[in-house]
């Protein structure tokens, strides 16, 4: 698995699905996987801010068991 920004999906629903696929809460994802605030995740899911591709890639890797 290699990062490929051409596969970036900025849809907040996709982020919500990725988080759900980890089996963790938003807080756990923020603290344990991404190292960001839970507030940042809430803003990304609400569409108030665009989440970076690195967030998508990290969560995809987590779901696939690469991390």
Image: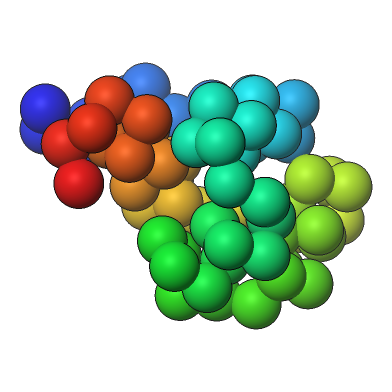
Viewer-nearest residue: 57 or 50: 57
The foreground one among 26 and 57 is 26
| Residue 18 in view of the camera | no
* Residue 6 pos. (x, y %): 33, 25
Instruction: Give how far across and how far down residue 40 sits, in percent.
Output: 71, 68
Find the residue positioned furthest to the front. 23
Q: Quadrant of residue 14?
A: top right
Colour setting: rainbow
Residue, far left: 2
Q: Which residue lies at the image location 69% right of the left edge and 55% below the top edge?
A: 26
Q: Residue at x 41, y 41 (%)?
A: 59
Count numbered badges in the picture.
0
Q: Quadrant of residue 34?
A: bottom left
Depth check, front residue: 62 or 7: 62
Task: Evaluate whether residue 65 shows in this view.
Answer: yes
- Rendering coords of residue 42 (x, y %): 81, 58
Is 35 left or right of 18, judged from the image as shown?
A: left
Image location (x, y in percent) of residue 20: 64, 32
Give the quarter of the image for residue 39: bottom right
| Point 16% across, 36% down: residue | 66
Quarter of the figure that contains the N terminus: top left
Q: Is residue 47 left or right of residue 58?
A: right
Residue at 41% x, 61% y is 33
């Amino acid at each position: 698995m290699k990062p490929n920004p051409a596969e970036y999906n900025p849809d907040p629903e996709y982020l919500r699905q990725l988080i759900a696929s980890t089996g963790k809460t938003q807080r756990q994802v923020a603290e344990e996987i991404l190292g960001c605030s839970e507030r940042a995740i809430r803003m990304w899911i609400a569409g108030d801010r665009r989440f970076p591709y690195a967030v998508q890639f990290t969560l995809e890797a987590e779901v696939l068991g690469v991390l």
